[in-house]
Amino acid sequence: MTSHTAISSRWSTRLSFMLAATGAAVGLGNIWKFPYIMGENGGAAFIVIYLLCIVALGIPIFIAELLIGRRGRHSPGYAARQLAVESKRHPAWQLTGWVTMFTGFMILTFYVVIAGWAMSYVFKSAQGMFIDANQAAITQLYRGMASSWTEMIIFTAFIVLATAIVVGNGFKQGLERTVRFAMPVMLLLLVGLAFYSSAVGDFAQAADFMFRPDFSEVTATTVLVALGHAFFTLSLASGVMMMYGAYLPASTSILSTSVWIAIADTLVALIAGLVIFPLVFAYGLTPAEGPGLIFQTLPLAFASMPLGVFIGTVFFIMLLLAAFTSAISMVESIATFVVERFDISRWAAALSTCAVLFSLSLLTVFSFAQAPWAQLDVYLFGKQLDNWFDVIEHITSNVLLPLGGLAIALFAGWAVKTQFMQAELNTSARAFKVWQFLVRFVAPVAITLVFLQLTGMLRL
Ligand code: PFF
Ligand code: NA
């Protein structure tokens, strides 16, 4: 049992929880990463496999995190500790909570830098810097930003400070109020962009690319990329959903809300595809462009399309809002832990967390800016890593996320007393059995396969 008092704040309404959880899930993963990995992995066939992964693995673990959080009623580390003790298990099981919090924090250190890029692009677009630009000019604009540590520090500092202010304001005044404003605006902008893009872009070719599967192109790697992304996109194994579960009223149905949030996250990713690909095809750009897709390719479409300055600016504002609500979600659990552990005010916790966050984000900033001290030359789990950003990104996505997910599945499926989970899930015996089967067997096996593949121990 922990000596800290249980969390007493609760989501005001089911909707505000849905907005917050959707806000945490929807982010750079949906708008920046999903379109380009779909583009690189063959479009529609990738989407089909990804959807299977969301259903068989994403939703069950999402549910597991909410169950643990609500039963534990503390920040993730303490919640896991409490459940381990109550279930008479070895205290080492609490690592499940601590590791995921650490993972979320490490993701956050580069996430805020990329969110800063989105902010920088809002200004670039609004200033008309894309007008009539050709590929060389856009590439130069992108490289200029991603090599200037002053520019990156300014925008990163902005994001981190804004995050600290939201979290410092407390659960209701900060987090809840922000998502209730930011998420509807973000979703509205996204849908508006999709309509516009389908009208001026090549909708037919985009729809063909996204919705007509060709399984002949599918390889084992496609499956594994889809599985890994299912994880990242729902913010699993990052402490976020465990924390949000701790604020859930006892009466909320965890099963149905989890399904809805997964659907919402998936829809946003698909709609983002419908914003991006009609433009990509209409302007003769290539879908398999990789990570530069929205920062180096899409601006080319904004450069020549009608209302390009306005649409480009709206696009990056939308991206910024999506990234910001994810950043807040990651700071929330850390700051709550700091309050519990050190018994200091919420403001002090948020500000000190964000000060550490900002310092660590410099590792990513200076990796991109190619400062000599940030360059590395290491070979880790079958991959060459050139700088600190590479190391942090690689270790979180490919090692900590799968390991954390595995730990959560095993913890919720085997370690925690079945009757605790059954009481929290509060659904039919059959639905509970299905969930339990998925976290006990399906998720651990699938995650182990991804892990072995990504770390190069298994070559498919
Ligand atoms: N789910 C976020 C996205 O799709 O952009 C990424 C993410 C946010 C992962 C927060 C982990 C996390 F803790
Ligand atoms: Na996402």
Image (tube, rainbow, N blue to C red):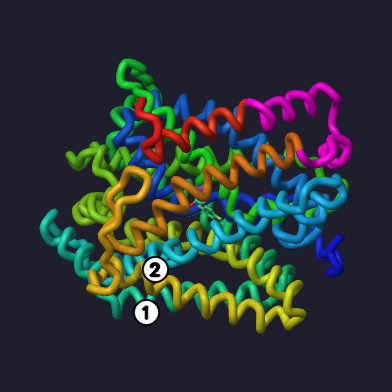
Q: Is residue 407 left or right of residue 91?
A: left
Rendered image: mark on residue 154: 1
Q: Amino acid at mark 1?
A: Ile
> Judging from the image, what secondary structure is the residue with disc 1 in?
helix
Residue 240, position as x, y percentages in the image = 63, 55
Q: Residue at x 27, y 44 (%)?
A: 290
According to the image, label 2 marks what residue? 116
- Going by the image, does 115 lie left or right of 353? left
Label at residue 402: none
Which residue is more in the foreground, 64 or 15? 64
Image quadrant in which the C terminus is located: top left
Q: Is residue 275 left or right of residue 128?
A: right
Camera-side residue: 414 or 187? 414
The answer to whether the beta carbon of the residue marked 1 is less than 8 Å from any atom of ligand 1 is no
First in residue order: circle 2 vs circle 1: 2
Q: CA distance from mark 2 to mark 1?
A: 8 Å
Q: Amino acid at mark 2?
A: Gly
Is residue 210 among what the camera can see? no
**Does the residue at mark 2 contact the one at mark 1 (Cβ under 8 Å)?**
yes
Is residue 316 shown left or right of residue 329? left
Quadrant for residue 385, please give it.
Answer: bottom left
Query: Which quadrant is the N terminus positioned in?
Result: bottom right
* Residues in magenta, as a range: 415-441
Q: Does residue 20 appear in the picture of this structure?
A: yes
Q: Residue at x 40, y 55 (%)?
A: 393
Query: How many other residues sit within 10 Å of disc 1, few (<14), some (14-19) or many (≥20)?
Result: few
Mark 2 residue element: helix
At horizontal 77% and vertical 45% (from top left) the residue drawn is 67
- Magenta-highlighted stretch: main secondary structure? helix
User: Relative to 342, does residue 287 appear above or below in the rendering?
Assistant: above
**At which x and y percent is residue 417?**
84, 39
